[in-house]
C-alpha cells in the first residue's frame, strides 16, 4: 500500500522523537511491503524562523496533500513566551491546524504496561487491577473556540470567555465514543457539569439520546469534579471516557500519569472525513531538547495509531505495540521512566523497538 505522510516535527524534542518514529515506519514498510512517502513541513517556532508565522501556507499545502499528518510538538521555553517566536505559538499552530482541518474527535489511549507498574503513581493494589482506558475528547467547540475579551484598567479589569456547544457536534463525538466502546469493554463514561452549565445539560441530553443507538453499551454520567477523584480511586473501572473539550484537556492530562510518563502517550485527532493528525502528549520539553534523553514511545505509538485509524493497517499497528511492550519487558528505559535505574538514549530506545519488530534489525 502506498501512502503519503506529512511530517511536522515542530520544536523542542519534536525532531528527536520524530526520527525514531520514522525508523519504525521504515521498518514497517520493509516487513509488510508498504511504501510511505514522507513530506516534511515546518510548524511552530521552527516555522517562525523561516516564514515569520507559526502555521504558514506552505505547511498548510503540504498537510492538505497527504493521507495523514504525523505531528511532533510545538512551543518554547516558559521564560521566553513573550518573544515573537514563541508568543501564542501553540494557539497559532496546533489549535490553528485543528481548526483548519475541522478535527472534532481526539482519541487518547492510556495504558499501563505491566513492566512499568512501579512507575505508576497509584497504590499497588489499585494498579494490580489493570489500567487501560481511552479518552475521547471533543475538539472543535467549547470555551477554546468562543469569544475571549478583557477590558478595563489594571485593578478594575473584566474578563470574558464564551463557552458554547451545538447539539450536532455533541452527537458526533458521542457516536465516536460508543463505536470505540463496542470494540473494547462496551462501557462509556460521559463527563460534564450538568448541575451548573447549560452546555453540560445539553451535552448530557444529547449523549443520552445517542446511547439509544448502542444498546450493547453501558452509559454512565459523572460530574467532572467527581470524575477527577473517581478516576484516581478506581481507574480500572473506566473504559471509554467521553468529554467536552476543556474537561477532556484536564482529565486526559490527569490520567496520563498512570502510564508512568507523558512520554508514553500517543493521541489521534480526526475529522468527519477520517483524515487524521497524530501526535504524542509529551509536549516540546525545551528543557531537555538536544540532549538525546527524550522518550520516543509516545511518538512511535502515535505513528502506530496513524497506521490503524487512517490507513486501516491493524496488523501493523499491533506489531508496533507488541514491539514496544517487548522492549519494556526487556528492561529498557529512558530517563523519565527509569526510576533511578540505568537509562538509555532516545535513539537506543528507538533502535531496540525496531529490532523487536518481528525480530528485525535496523
Image (cartoon, grey):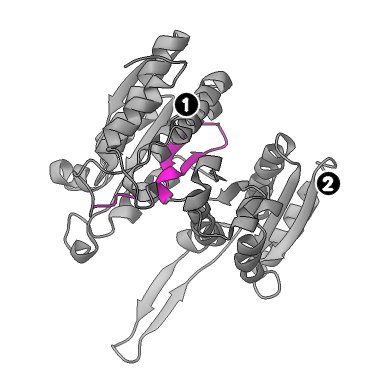
Identity of the residue drawn at 75% across and 47% down = 187
Q: Secondary structure at mark 2?
A: loop
Residue 67 appears in the figure:
yes
Residue 8 x, y percent position in the rendering: 31, 35
Q: Residue furthest top?
A: 33
Q: Give the number of the mark in front: 1 or 2.
A: 1
Residue at the disc numbered 1: 323
Viewer-proximal residue, 349 or 101? 349
Viewer-proximal residue, 192 or 210? 192
Magenta-span inclusion, residue 265: yes
Q: Secondary structure at mark 1?
A: helix
Residue 34 appears in the figure:
no
Could you say which quadrant of the image residue 88 lies in? Answer: bottom left
Q: Residue furthest left?
A: 50
Q: Which mark is residue 137?
A: none
Residue 168 x, y percent position in the rendering: 66, 49
Magenta-highlighted residues? 262-286
Identity of the residue drawn at 29% across and 24% down = 39
Seen in the picture, residue 38 relative to 11 is either above or below; the reply is: above
Residue 83 x, y percent position in the rendering: 16, 61
* Sequence-wise first label, 1 or 2: 2
Seen in the picture, residue 172 relative to 77 is either above or below; the reply is: above
Q: Residue furthest front?
A: 341
Magenta-span inclusion, residue 315: no
Q: Which mark is residue 212?
A: 2
Amino acid at each position: 500500500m502506498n501512502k503519503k505522510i506529512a511530517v511536522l516535527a515542530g520544536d523542542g524534542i519534536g525532531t528527536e522523537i520524530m526520527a525514531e518514529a520514522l525508523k519504525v515506519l521504515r521498518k514497517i514498510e520493509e516487513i509488510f511491503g508498504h511504501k510511505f512517502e514522507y513530506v516534511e513541513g515546518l510548524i511552530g517556532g521552527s516555522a517562525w524562523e523561516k516564514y515569520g508565522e507559526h502555521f504558514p501556507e506552505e505547511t498548510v499545502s503540504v498537510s492538505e496533500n497527504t493521507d495523514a499528518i504525523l505531528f511532533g510538538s510545538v512551543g518554547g521555553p516558559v521564560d521566553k513566551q513573550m518573544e515573537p517566536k514563541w508568543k501564542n505559538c501553540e494557539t497559532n499552530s496546533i489549535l490553528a491546524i485543528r481548526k483548519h482541518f475541522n478535527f472534532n474527535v481526539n482519541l487518547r489511549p492510556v495504558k499501563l504496561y505491566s513492566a512499568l507498574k512501579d512507575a505508576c503513581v497509584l497504590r499497588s493494589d489499585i494498579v494490580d487491577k489493570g489500567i487501560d482506558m481511552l479518552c475521547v475528547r471533543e475538539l472543535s467547540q467549547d470555551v477554546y473556540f468562543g469569544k475571549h475579551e478583557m477590558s478595563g484598567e489594571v485593578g478594575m479589569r473584566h474578563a470574558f470567555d464564551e463557552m458554547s456547544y451545538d447539539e450536532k457536534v455533541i452527537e458526533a463525538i458521542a457516536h465516536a465514543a460508543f463505536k470505540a466502546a463496542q470494540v473494547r469493554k462496551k462501557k462509556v463514561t460521559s463527563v460534564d457539569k450538568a448541575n451548573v452549565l447549560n452546555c453540560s445539560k445539553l451535552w448530557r441530553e444529547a449523549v443520552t439520546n445517542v446511547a439509544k443507538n448502542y444498546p450493547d453499551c453501558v452509559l454512565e454520567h459523572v460530574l467532572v469534579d467527581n470524575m477527577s477523584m473517581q478516576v484516581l480511586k478506581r481507574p480500572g473501572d473506566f473504559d471509554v471516557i467521553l468529554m467536552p473539550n476543556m474537561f477532556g484537556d484536564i482529565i486526559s492530562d490527569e490520567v496520563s500519569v498512570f502510564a508512568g510518563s507523558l512520554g508514553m502517550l500517543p493521541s489521534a485527532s480526526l475529522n468527519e472525513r477520517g483524515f487524521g493528525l497524530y501526535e504524542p502528549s509529551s509536549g516540546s520539553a525545551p528543557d531537555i531538547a538536544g540532549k538525546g534523553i527524550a522518550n520516543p514511545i509516545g511518538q512511535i505509538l502515535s505513528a502506530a495509531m496513524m497506521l490503524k485509524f487512517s490507513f486501516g493497517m491493524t496488523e501493523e499497528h499491533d506489531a508496533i505495540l507488541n514491539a514496544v511492550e517487548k522492549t519494556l519487558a526487556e528492561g529498557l528505559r529512558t530517563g523519565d521512566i527509569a526510576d533511578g535505574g540505568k537509562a538509555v538514549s532516545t535513539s537506543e530506545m528507538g533502535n531496540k523497538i525496531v529490532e523487536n519488530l518481528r525480530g528485525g534489525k535496523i
